[in-house]
Amino acid sequence: MKKLFSISGVLGALAAAPALAQDGLEVIGRPVDGAMGFQPAATEVARRLQWLDGLILVIITAITVFVTLLLVWVIIRYNRKRNPESATFTHHTPIEVAWTVIPIVILVFIGAFSLPTLFYQQEIPEADVTIKVTGYQWFWGYEYVDEGFGFDAYMIGSPATGGNNALTPETEAALVDAGYAREEFLLATDNAVVIPVNKTVVMQVTGADVIHAWAVPAFGVKQDGVPGRLAELWFKPEKEGIYFGQCSELCGIAHAYMPITVKVVSEEAYAAWLADAKAEFAGTPQSLTVASN
């Protein structure tokens, strides 16, 4: 999708449709300095993935501890000083059976939990909102498929919005004008994806030039956008707020400057934003029927 509006249009949009959806929204999906762990899960997909990660962490930690203790025991028990005459056998059937069967059991156990989660991700439900997202070097293009309009989203501070990819006083002022804090630099975009809370959103993901990846950690989604192919992901956000993501596939020199901003709003706020967005971003005009004599 080509640029739908000029830089002046971008600046105008900051004060128009996206700003409407931001009022009163909590910033939820933002990295926190010094923190550990995942961002708060805002969807069932993310919650399942985080639970599965915790389960696998417990399993691999137990395996690591067991192998470490086993190595320590072997080093102490069978060193040359304590065991001057080493054994000469070459096979030990019970041990060989054990180290074959036990890993199989562990993998089957993990699969019993991971496969349902994978199927849950991959089975795309019927959408309440369908958005086509196209990755470009280096910005995102969004099309609200059922609403007949689209827009581009650039990082606030990128050259396309009058910046230079640096947190200058001008960029900080632009962030404040758009309703963001300086901590949201490299995360906030001039136009955000706005979606209603508790509605199923299907994103159709592709790339226009090279491979990009649309990823929002709080939603538990990441999908490569491959030129010439159309992939899908879905999520159902459960809490209003502002969430951030990034292009997660190395796509060139400005890869680090392709953030994703998603605003989850109430149905009423979404309807109001949608009406303004159709006017702001030139929604597809309806065809006219001319009556014949």
Image (tube, grey):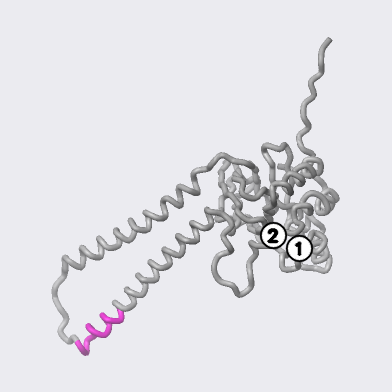
Residue with the mark numbered 1: 180
User: Which quadrant of the view contains residue 92?
Assistant: bottom left
Tell me the number on the disc at residue 123. Answer: none
| Residue 25 higher or lower than 36, as above or below | above
Visible in this render: residue 205?
no
Rendered residue at 78%/42% (across/down): 275
Q: Nearer the viewer, residue 199 or 135?
A: 199
> Which is more N-terminal, label 2 or label 1?
1
Q: Position of residue 205 (x, y in %)?
A: 60, 45
| Residue 96 higher or lower than 263, as above or below | below
The amino acid type of the residue labelled 2 equals Tyr
The amino acid type of the residue labelled 1 equals Tyr
Q: Is residue 224 left or right of residue 110?
A: right
Q: Is residue 42 left or right of residue 119?
A: right
Residue 73 included in the magenta stretch of the image:
yes
Rendered residue at 40%/68% (across/down): 58
| Residue 242 higher or lower than 135, as above or below | below
Residue 46 included in the magenta stretch of the image:
no
